[in-house]
Amino acid sequence: MAAKSRGALRSLWIVGGCYLIAALVVLMRPGAILSSDERTVIRFSHWQAEAGPREAMDALIERYEELNPDVRVVQLDVPGRVYTRWVRTQLIGETAPDLIEFNGGSTDIVPRFFEPISKYVNEPNPYNKGTPLEGMRWRDTFVDGLNTPSSYIDRLSNYYAVTMCSLTLRLFYNPDLLEEITGSREPPLTYEDLRRIQDQVVAYSAREGRRVSLYAGCDYTGEIVIGQLLSRAGLGVSFNLDRYREQGSKAAQMAQEYLRGHWDYRTPALYAGLQNAREAVPFFRPGFQQLDRDAATQEFLRGQALMFVTGTWDATTLKTMAPFEVAVDHTPWPAKSDNSEAGRYYWSPISDGEANTSMPFYLNKQSKNKDVAMDFMRFVTSLEGNTIWMIKSGWNPSIRGVELLEELKIFKHRFRGHQLRTSFMRGFGGETKEVWQRLTHHLTTQNGGVEEFMEVFEKDFPAALRKDVESNVRVLYLSLRRDVPALVSLATLDRLVGHNDKEVQARQIRESSQNLTEAKMYEAEAVLAKGPAVADPMP
Amino acid sequence: MSWMRLRILSEMPRLIPLGRLLCVGLCGLLSASANSTPEVAIWEKLSVYLSAEAERELEQLPEATDRQALRERDFCAAVVHLDQQPLSESRLDVVEQRFQALLEMEDNDEIARASRYLLGRIAQIFRAKPDVVKAAKYFRGLAEQPGPGIWDEQARLKLTLLTLYVLPVRTPSERIELAEAYASAARDPIAVRDMHRLVARAILFYNIPPERALEHLLQADKIGGLMGTQAADQLVQIGELAWDEGKEDMAAHYYERLEKEYPRDPRIFTMQQRLAGELTPTRGKVVNGR
């Protein structure tokens, strides 16, 4: 009995001791209540779990702390799947980090929890002293001038975030395997080259008795390839219906043109896009649509797929994990200039689109060290900081004048080319996305085909598109309702405190933007009500 | 001397509350002179969409005393109330009553005019079933009656929008003509510019020959003042319309401006190709293309 109670007592001591040690560790952490480290602590969070960014951030922290010995920077990398929920919880609980990577400029999170940073970005970045960027406004040092929707939020007339990098879509391939299959390490330059390589891949698989696919396959890469083949074919269609003379209609406009009866997926260019998509199905392993991105990565890393079409955010992961050299090039797509049947409707070259920079970091309104946090952001987006970022992460920089590493030059944004303004596969809204997701297998399975797909797709798509347009109208009403008190407030402040010219201009820009939004909303309503008869006289 | 000191010391406890009172009064006076309209902080919150915070601060404001201060407070409270969630029909009824009450006291000062504008906006976009005829009545009234503030021009813009797309007008051409008449009545250059832009857009929406749209956009461009995407889009629109109308020099001029002002705009490429005689995508007849 006595021995039992002695044992219990000992366990209690051990548990109590562990608790005490844990408590001391927590309380003596730098910045905590018992810590003798009196440095200012700033924390930042992101969800970039890929290889590269975390290590790059560690290097940036090390250098920043060397330059600023009175500051300690803590990096929090939170898995992407829970990140948004985690950020919201932290913000509401007032325990969020000082700097937060965030996507969702259109939500109310930004005005509620994040601090406008216009005053910071309109000043020169002191860390650029002695460089060609010295004296330049901080925002002008970004390759896109920070004119990206995640940074400059129109409806709030303010800059809210600074960005770290720029991203593009590229073709990653295994040159050893390519040589084994084709006798050459040269990547395909045209779509016809790619198709020839596909034939060689099929022959190689049969000859060697082991399955190799041209492209690493999963739902994600399948969507990229089918989406691109379709949307690139649709470029001419969106230009043909460019009612507002903006060099191609955007998705919302194309949805209206559909309801006005001006195009559908039997329009020859789009039908050809679907045929090309069908022909591209054997580029992937069977059943690819049921697999996730990790499965495609594994397929590529195991040498079971020759190429991987993905964003440059996967570059470092692929290069560090592959037991072979990973080469990168532009993905070849069908082109009119090839004079092939596949390229008949495809304009080329196509640009990489609007060169918006990515990975935006916002300043937490509750931060007790706002100036220090922004100082850290100034450093990481200075010429020196962003160069460290590029070298360590393998991701392209967001700052002008950073000299690109030779192997990263291929990732550089291509401005020259026609612009894709509508994604014909996923661009119209949630309802049509769901139809695509549910029915694409009719296009991609062995027994499927373009007509098999069209037969089911044409039943569901029109109603889904209509719902998407209706939903867009509802969103516009909600957004206008949110804007009215804000704009009346700005006008009232003009009266009560007198705004300067710049502030008045900012209000006027928001009012102009609101008028345009209202016009678009009424156009959508009119098209929903009257369809092709929208321009007819009233009875 | 020591007697005096003793007396002061003995009086100290009684003097402390008096001193405190004086300090509080002085602080109050200073803050009142620094911010004579306590609603400013609330308006600032509303302007950045912090409606819940605005409501909390509004509840904490000291009571308004004189008639004008009370009017400012009532107007602010009505807008704060309009901005709260959930936005029910009964909430809108209450807000409407508040604006109506402000109008009954004085019907054409700046608060009254803003209230009339907001009554129009409630009918136009806040109600579950919009009443655009009622909204147009408020907007027309404001546009026709001179008064302080920006509200006549704002109302004229909304009237233009309703005329172009929603009010019962027989043909698209008549809609455009009526809207052009509103544009010619506007005085504020920014409002005039925006009306030109709206009319141009409606011309293209209704498939009316686009030459008139080009004229309106050129007028808008003369006024200027746009920034960012809207400004770049307008340069492209003028360039493309000019191209479709066979005015190639004008098209080239606007693309030169686009290249100079927005050198990263990816749309420069297509126009350069076109001007160099290369084959490029074209607009179809269905939208009156070239």
Image: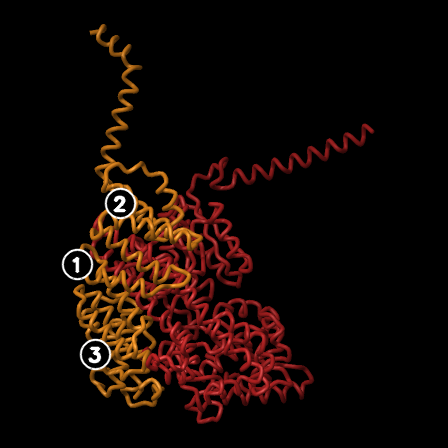
Chain colours: A red, B orange
Earlier residue among tags 2 and 1: 2
Point out residue A98 in the picture as x, y percentages from the top left corner. Answer: 43, 49
Q: Residue at x 23, y 39 (%)?
A: B34
Question: The residue marked by circle 1 belongs to what chain?
Answer: B
Which quadrant: the C terminus of chain A?
A: bottom left
Say whether residue A208 is left or right of residue B170.
right
Question: The residue marked by circle 3 belongs to what chain?
Answer: B
Q: Residue at x 20, y 76 (%)?
A: B218
Closer to the observer: label 3 or label 2? 2
Which quadrant: the N terminus of chain A?
A: top right
Point out residue A287 in the picture as x, y percentages from the top left corner. Answer: 64, 77
Instruction: Write down the residue under mark 1.
Output: B146
Instruction: Write down the residue under mark 3.
Output: B215
Mark 2 surroundings: few (<14), some (14-19) or many (≥20) residues within 10 A: some
For the residues marked 3 and 2, what is the alpha-carbon distance in whole angstroms?
Answer: 43 Å
Instruction: Write down the residue under mark 2.
Output: B72
The answer to whether dots 2 and 1 both sit on one chain is: yes
Q: Secondary structure at mark 2?
A: helix
With respect to residue A139, does A375 lie above or below? above
Choose between B158 and B37: the one closer to the eye: B158
Residue A512 placement: quadrant: bottom left
With respect to residue B223, does A225 lie above or below? below
Q: Amino acid at mark 1?
A: Pro
Q: Amino acid at mark 3?
A: Glu
Q: Secondary structure at mark 3?
A: helix
Point out residue A140 in the picture as x, y percentages from the top left corner. Answer: 30, 63
Earlier residue among tags 3 and 2: 2
Q: Is residue A362 visible?
A: yes
Mark 1 surroundings: few (<14), some (14-19) or many (≥20) residues within 10 A: few
Choose between A200 and B6: the one closer to the eye: B6
Earlier residue among tags 3 and 1: 1
For the residues marked 3 and 1, what is the alpha-carbon distance in whole angstroms?
Answer: 29 Å
